[in-house]
Image (cartoon, grey):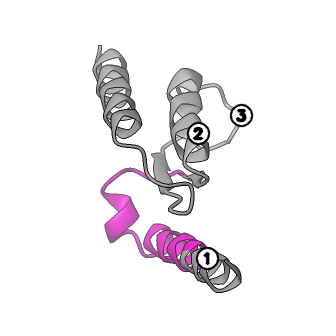
Amino acid sequence: RAFAGELAALEATQGQVRTHPLPASMPILILCADRRREPDSGHSAPELWRHRLALATDQGGQCLSITGASHLSLLLDPEHAHQVSQHLRAFATLLAGAARSG
């Protein structure tokens, strides 16, 4: 039931993004908390992952997951927070490079 609610919310968000699309020069980064311990353990929601990936790539961005993380640990666990900051830094560097070359 929780997955169905999250999926419905994601579909609504995708609909909003598509009605007000970002310009191709403004990619988005989606960072996902992924409590699975192994990437191919089959405990995640593949459909939800495909939606997130489609949303990011539609805008020329990226969709990444942090394995073993919860939404709270993305901020409070030092290792997970470090991974978040590294992904944000890399994405910002990518955008800055694209802006300089464009």
Q: Nearer the viewer, residue 74 or 61?
A: 61
Q: Tell me the distance, in whole angstroms, between the alpha carbons under discs 1 and 3.
A: 25 Å
Amino acid type at image mark 3: Asp
- Mark 1 or mark 3: name the one nearer the start of the chain: 3
Check disc 1 and report the residue beneath it. Answer: 90
Comparing labels 1 and 3, the label whose residue is closer to the camera: 1
- Mark 2 or mark 1: name the one nearer the start of the chain: 2
* Residue 40 tag number: 3
20 lies left or right of 82: left
Q: Quadrant of the C terminus?
A: bottom right
* Residue 98 tag number: none
- Magenta residues (range): 66-91
Magenta run includes residue 99? no
Comparing labels 3 and 2, the label whose residue is closer to the camera: 2
Residue extending furthest toward the bottom: 100
- For the point 58% across and 71% down, the residue is 91
Q: Nearer the viewer, residue 35 or 33?
A: 33
Check disc 2 and report the residue beneath it. Answer: 53
- For the point 50% across and 62% down, the residue is 26
